[in-house]
Amino acid sequence: MRKYDHLEMRCPRLGGEVTFSYCRKEGGGLPCQRIITCWSPFFPIEQYLRETMTADAWDAFVRQIPKDKVTTIIELIEEAKKRAKQKNE
């Protein structure tokens, strides 16, 4: 288990509680684009990510192009549907 994975906070994008482990891999294997902004009040997140990510993964993370709001909303809805379906199975 990773050091901070169990921590929880309210996600400004999703509107509910999420764990750090979710934020760490939310972006399709990369951290959520907002992870540094959201988690920096709690621990040295940028330092932690630099220490735990490969150089290539860090580079891909910092070079991510933000998605437009409609695309983001559609992806969040689809992800919520998948989680609900998995919960019911």
Image (cartoon, helix red, strand yellow):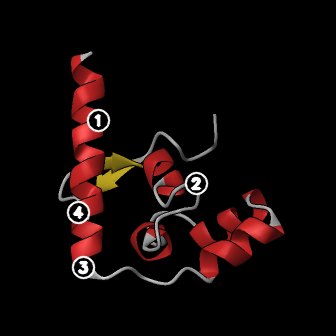
Cα–Cα span, label 2 and label 1: 17 Å
Q: Position of residue 49 (x, y in %)?
A: 66, 64
Within 10 Å of disc 3 (Cα), the crowding (few <14, some 14-19, many 20+) is few
Find residue 73 and report its image quarter.
bottom left
Amino acid type of the residue tagged 2 in the rendering = Gly
The reply to whether the C-beta atoms of the residues labelled 4 and 3 are less than 8 Å apart is no
Within 10 Å of disc 1 (Cα), the crowding (few <14, some 14-19, many 20+) is few
Find residue 2 and report its image quarter.
top right
- Residue at 74% x, 57% y is 52
* Among numbered discs 2 and 4, the one appearing first in the sequence: 2
- Residue at 17% x, 59% y is 15
Q: Which residue is mark 2?
A: 29
Amino acid type of the residue tagged 4 in the rendering = Ile
Disc marking residue 74? 4
Visible residue check, residue 17: no
Name the element at disc 4.
Answer: helix
Disc marking residue 83? 1
Q: Position of residue 24 (x, y in %)?
A: 53, 55
Q: Position of residue 20 (x, y in %)?
A: 46, 50
- Residue at 42% x, 82% y is 66
Q: Is residue 25 left or right of residue 68?
A: right
Q: Which residue is mark 3?
A: 69
Cα–Cα span, label 2 and label 4: 18 Å
Q: Nearer the viewer, mark 2 or mark 4?
A: 4
Amino acid type of the residue tagged 1 in the rendering = Arg
- Residue at 52% x, 43% y is 5
The reply to whether the C-beta atoms of the residues labelled 2 and 3 are less than 8 Å apart is no
* Among numbered discs 2 and 1, the one appearing first in the sequence: 2
Amino acid type of the residue tagged 3 in the rendering = Lys
Cα–Cα span, label 3 and label 1: 21 Å
